[in-house]
């Protein structure tokens, strides 16, 4: 049915919800097939060891076991790594199963197939590995010394050095009136999508066609790269992302288990399923962060930032996964923050260690950058005795409506930062809080108040393909959309993005609804299947609306161009005599003479009387390659109470003001901010992957790794009333998926430090646990901590 | 193998399982009720929460055999036909779910809790959800959903 309503900007309820709410979702573990075998992996309890032998005899003889396989049984290529960021980068070869050495706690050496899940897991435990243990190196600074080498053939653990280089007058880093130098360490994080990974491989053996259903963010990239690893022809491989229970970057990857399941299904001509256990997830799925930054800020006594310089050491883990060294590079374009420094420097070194590979984790490089920038700005403010809000305000980049090249070389699409800061300070009642803080300090209260700020920008809408090419990324950054208007009036939308909680079925329907004058209820959005939605580059890096959503816009334009031709023909007027309004093509001056898209879809379908040269069927495909990134921005303020006797922190207020450009659905935007901030709070106060001296992960289950529950996460005040349209795309959209995780960690940590700064505390690292806070207070007091 | 017989969502069901089978796998794999999800192996995440004789339990903490002869309710049994349970409806209206994986557990935990405490405060709800983890929503809209549902359920009974 045609409609004259508009939907962009409305909190339209989600089309995704009915199945998810009633227990009828298609998560990977809900799939089963006749004749299906279960796969399990043997991960021996070593961290770094030379493999002397793998005895599969006992495992192979156990009940239900169909086969046990080691690396020697496969002819598989290496797992994909698509971002060799420099010419000189050293690339460790990474096969699906380790054969010479175990290089991290969790490295798999054998794979078992059995009739049931339990039989497969039991047999995997029974695979006997004899190995000679080697010293392990876990800490990145230790690894950089090359005393223990992770990959002998590379000869060093320092595998990559990427320098953005500097801009502006570098002498300010020596000569400025105020030089602040700090070192910040950011721990490893475990992404913890609540659904673990899993996959099901099956096929049509007589024609050698294979399907992989997998809990992934990237079915399209997985198809291309798994064809390479498995040797299956790309046109005979189909990858399906069913309902996926969260990703956060951890499913932005192509994993050994996916290649092994495909290879084994093809070998045995039976479906093969693997579901990851949570303990397994903690070692076998990528981790995030794990970086140390040496930072320098050059400024003036009155608070001007003259330059910022960052030298980073980044933990790659034992191997690269899909993008590993590209993550710090991705952050490498935002080290000016929303400020206007006249000089900058950024470089990083990537170091391999005997740990689980790192890769994208919500924000991917940009949270790492924003954390150190925002900590540094607070340190600067403390040093010169100024209010951190004032220092931020005087250094914010001036507003611009058109794209401007940043000092770091990329074009910022549009900017208007100061009102965001003002809005956040107003919502949180900043002056009142500072007064409360003064009173508590004067009284010497046990519970002190801290106010932490974070003003940020992020780079979204990954990415212009030519820039990706210049950065040596192997793929493009475009995305595709196909729209088919069926004769029933229903509209099918095929998107190349692949959501896992981001509500594309709803938001994409809103975009198309407005474009075609059709209700969202009459629009079905298909996604995540390389057969039915073949044109795509998937979902990560807050790219979906800014690339895939914009592709939809262009497909709508194509549909409308064709529909206009048909409408003019049927109404016997010139095309120029038609205008689009209230959901239909209307004759200028006679608006009741009109044709709607559903009406024209019928005409295009029966094709009885189409104008000369017009093809039947009202459908169109657009592939959109963004000309630029998009640059959301915002200001977050966190207010904490810190118990100065126990070091315990409680967040009492959190205000998030974000400008993500034009908003398609404010309800969804708000939800993305809530979740992002919660993950940022988790990173700031609770979460940290820890290893023992031998390199075993000690935070190896959800009982040791502190994921916050509803009692730890505060109610947040969100505001997105400022919508500065992106100049990159005609929708004006920018992206919001990662903003919270980028902005929150420094806001929270700055608040904790602020709460106890009057006691002399100047630094506390993430996660700001009660113990860390208590120790910092004791050290500042000069006591024995 | 041992035979386990239960009443699930009002219907008698039974199946033969290995004695070590956890209740959650009995529900998912023997009875095909895959709405109850598994998110961890340490009873930490709460995704597998169901009602056993009306009270919420993490179905990975029990053996199927321990449920023998008892009454279970899972997410599949919450709606009546097309009519969503007030909690389901409230989650939908308040955007209380994103990826949806924790949602069945959240709803079952909330259903059990609201029977104990039909008019909870925000803090009460947060405490009641301590055993259920969500990675998408920051809990804000889940808490709102449950508070709203409590209101509408109280209204319906009044």
Image (cartoon, coloured by chain):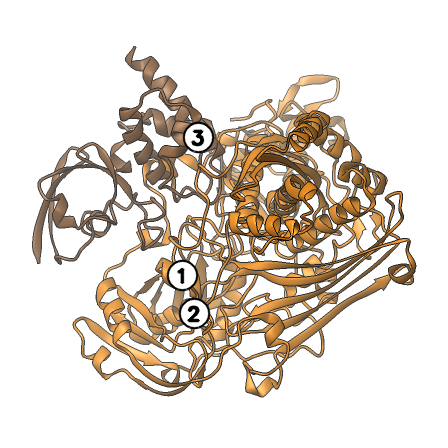
Q: Which mark is residue B143?
A: 3
Relative placement, left or right, of A694 versus A429 is: left
Q: Chain of mark 1?
A: A
- Chain coloured brown here: B
> Between residues B71 and A207, which one lies in front from this camera angle?
B71
Circle 1 residue = A700
- Chain coloured orange here: A
Determine the image quadrant of residue A381: top right
Question: Which residue corresponds to the image point at 74% horizontal and 33% vertical from the top-left?
Answer: A420
Determine whether label 1 and label 2 are within 8 Å by CB: yes
List x then y, in percent, for residue A211.
40, 63
> Between residues A739 and A698, which one lies in front from this camera angle?
A698
Q: Is disc 3 surrounded by few (<14), some (14 to 19) or many (20+) residues within 10 Å?
A: many
Same chain assignment for discs 1 and 2: yes
Total labels: the figure holds 3
Q: Is disc 2 surrounded by few (<14), some (14 to 19) or many (20+) residues within 10 Å?
A: many
Question: Which residue corresponds to the image point at 70% horizontal and 29% vertical from the top-left?
Answer: A430
> Between residues A178 and B133, which one lies in front from this camera angle?
A178
Which quarter of the figure is the N terminus of chain B placed in? bottom left
Q: Is disc 1 surrounded by few (<14), some (14 to 19) or many (20+) residues within 10 Å?
A: some
Q: Is residue A55 above or below residue A656?
A: below
Label 2, secondary structure: give it. loop
Label 3, secondary structure: give it. helix
> Between residues A204 and A157, which one lies in front from this camera angle?
A157
Q: CA distance from mark 1 to mark 3?
A: 29 Å
Relative placement, left or right, of A112 versus A252 is: left
């Amino acid at each position: 049915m045609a409609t004259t309503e508009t939907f962009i900007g409305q909190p339209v309820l989600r089309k995704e919800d009915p199945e998810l709410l009633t227990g009828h979702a298609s998560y990977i573990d809900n799939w089963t097939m006749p004749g299906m075998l279960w796969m399990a992996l043997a991960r021996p309890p070593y961290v770094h060891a030379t493999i002397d032998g793998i005895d599969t005899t006992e495992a192979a003889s156990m009940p239900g076991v169909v086969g046990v396989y080691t690396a020697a049984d496969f002819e598989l290529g290496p797992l994909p790594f698509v971002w060799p960021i420099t010419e000189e980068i050293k690339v460790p070869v990474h096969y699906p199963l380790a054969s010479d050495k175990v290089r991290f706690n969790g490295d798999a050496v054998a794979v078992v197939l059995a009739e049931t899940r339990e039989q497969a897991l039991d047999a995997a435990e029974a695979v006997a590995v004899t190995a000679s243990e080697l010293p392990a190196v876990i800490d990145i600074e230790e690894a950089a010394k090359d005393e223990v080498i992770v990959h002998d053939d590379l000869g060093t653990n320092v595998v990559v050095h990427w320098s953005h280089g500097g801009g502006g007058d570098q002498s300010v880093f020596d000569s400025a009136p105020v030089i602040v130098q700090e070192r910040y360490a950011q721990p490893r994080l475990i992404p913890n999508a609540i659904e673990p990974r899993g996959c099901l491989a099956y096929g049509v053996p007589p024609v050698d066609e294979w399907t992989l259903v997998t809990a992934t963010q990237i079915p399209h990239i997985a198809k291309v790269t798994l064809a390479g690893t498995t040797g299956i022809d790309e046109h005979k491989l189909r990858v399906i992302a069913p309902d996926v229970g969260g990703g956060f970057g951890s499913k932005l990857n192509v994993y050994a288990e996916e290649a092994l399941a495909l290879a084994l299904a093809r070998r045995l001509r039976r479906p093969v399923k693997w579901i990851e256990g949570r303990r397994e997830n903690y070692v076998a799925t990528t981790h995030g962060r794990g970086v140390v930054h040496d930072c320098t800020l050059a400024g003036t006594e009155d608070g001007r930032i003259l330059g910022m310089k960052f030298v980073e050491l980044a933990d790659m883990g034992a191997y690269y996964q899909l993008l590993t060294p590209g993550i710090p590079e991705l952050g490498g374009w935002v080290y000016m923050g929303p400020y206007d420094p006249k000089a900058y420097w950024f470089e990083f070194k990537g170091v391999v260690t005997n740990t689980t590979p790192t890769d994208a984790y919500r924000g991917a490089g940009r949270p790492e950058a924003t954390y150190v920038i925002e900590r540094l700005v607070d340190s600067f403010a403390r040093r010169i005795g100024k209010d951190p809000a004032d220092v931020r305000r005087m250094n914010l980049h001036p507003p611009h409506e058109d794209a401007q090249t940043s000092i770091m070389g990329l074009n910022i699409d549009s900017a208007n930062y100061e009102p965001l800061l003002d809005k956040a300070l107003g919502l949180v009642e900043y002056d009142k809080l500072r007064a409360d803080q003064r009173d508590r300090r004067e009284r010497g209260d046990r519970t002190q108040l801290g106010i932490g700020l974070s003003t940020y920008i992020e780079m979204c809408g990954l990415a212009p393909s030519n820039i990706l090419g210049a950065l040596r990324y192997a793929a493009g950054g475009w995305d595709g959309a196909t729209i088919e208007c069926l004769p029933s009036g229903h509209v099918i939308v095929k998107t190349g993005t692949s959501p896992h909680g981001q509500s594309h079925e709803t938001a994409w329907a809103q975009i198309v609804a407005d474009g075609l004058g059709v209700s969202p209820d009459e629009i079905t959005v298909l996604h995540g299947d390389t057969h039915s939605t073949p044109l795509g580059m998937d979902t990560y890096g807050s790219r979906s609306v800014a690339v895939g959503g914009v592709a939809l816009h262009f497909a709508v334009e194509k549909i409308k161009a064709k529909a206009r031709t048909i409408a003019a023909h049927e109404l016997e007027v010139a095309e120029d005599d038609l205008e689009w309004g209230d959901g239909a093509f209307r004759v200028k001056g006679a608006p009741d003479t009109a044709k709607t898209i559903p009406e024209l879809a019928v005409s295009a379908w029966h094709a009885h009387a189409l104008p000369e040269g017009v093809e039947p069927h009202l459908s169109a495909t657009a592939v959109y390659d963004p000309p630029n990134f998009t640059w959301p921005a915002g200001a977050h303020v966190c207010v904490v109470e810190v118990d100065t006797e126990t070091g315990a922190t409680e967040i009492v207020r959190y205000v998030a003001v974000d400008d993500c450009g034009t908003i398609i659905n404010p309800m969804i935007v708000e939800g993305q901010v809530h979740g992002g901030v919660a993950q940022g709070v988790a990173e700031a106060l609770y979460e940290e992957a820890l290893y023992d001296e031998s390199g075993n992960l000690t935070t190896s289950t959800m009982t040791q790794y502190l994921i916050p529950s509803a009692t730890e996460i505060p109610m947040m005040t969100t505001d997105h009333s400022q919508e500065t349209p992106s100049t990159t795309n005609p929708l004006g959209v920018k992206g919001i998926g990662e903003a919270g995780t980028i902005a929150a960690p420094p806001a929270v940590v700055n608040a904790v430090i602020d709460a106890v700064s009057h006691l002399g505390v100047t630094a506390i690292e993430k996660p700001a646990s009660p113990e860390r806070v208590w120790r910092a207070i004791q050290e500042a007091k000069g006591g024995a901590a | 193998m041992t035979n386990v017989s239960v009443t699930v969502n009002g219907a008698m069901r039974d199946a033969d399982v290995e004695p070590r089978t956890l209740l959650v796998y009995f529900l998912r794999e023997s009875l095909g009720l895959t709405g109850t999800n598994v998110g961890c192996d340490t009873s930490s995440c709460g995704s597998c929460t169901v009602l056993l004789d009306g009270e919420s339990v993490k179905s990975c903490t029990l053996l199927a055999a321990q449920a023998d002869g008892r009454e279970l309710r899972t997410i599949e049994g919450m709606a009546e036909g097309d009519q969503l349970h007030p909690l389901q409806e409230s989650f939908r209206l308040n955007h209380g779910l994103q990826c949806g994986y924790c949602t069945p557990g959240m709803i079952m935990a909330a259903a059990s809790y609201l029977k104990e405490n039909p008019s909870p405060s925000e803090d009460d709800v947060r405490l009641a959800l301590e055993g259920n983890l969500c990675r998408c929503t920051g809990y804000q809209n889940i808490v709102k959903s449950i508070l709203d549902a409590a209101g509408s359920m109280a209204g319906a009974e009044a």
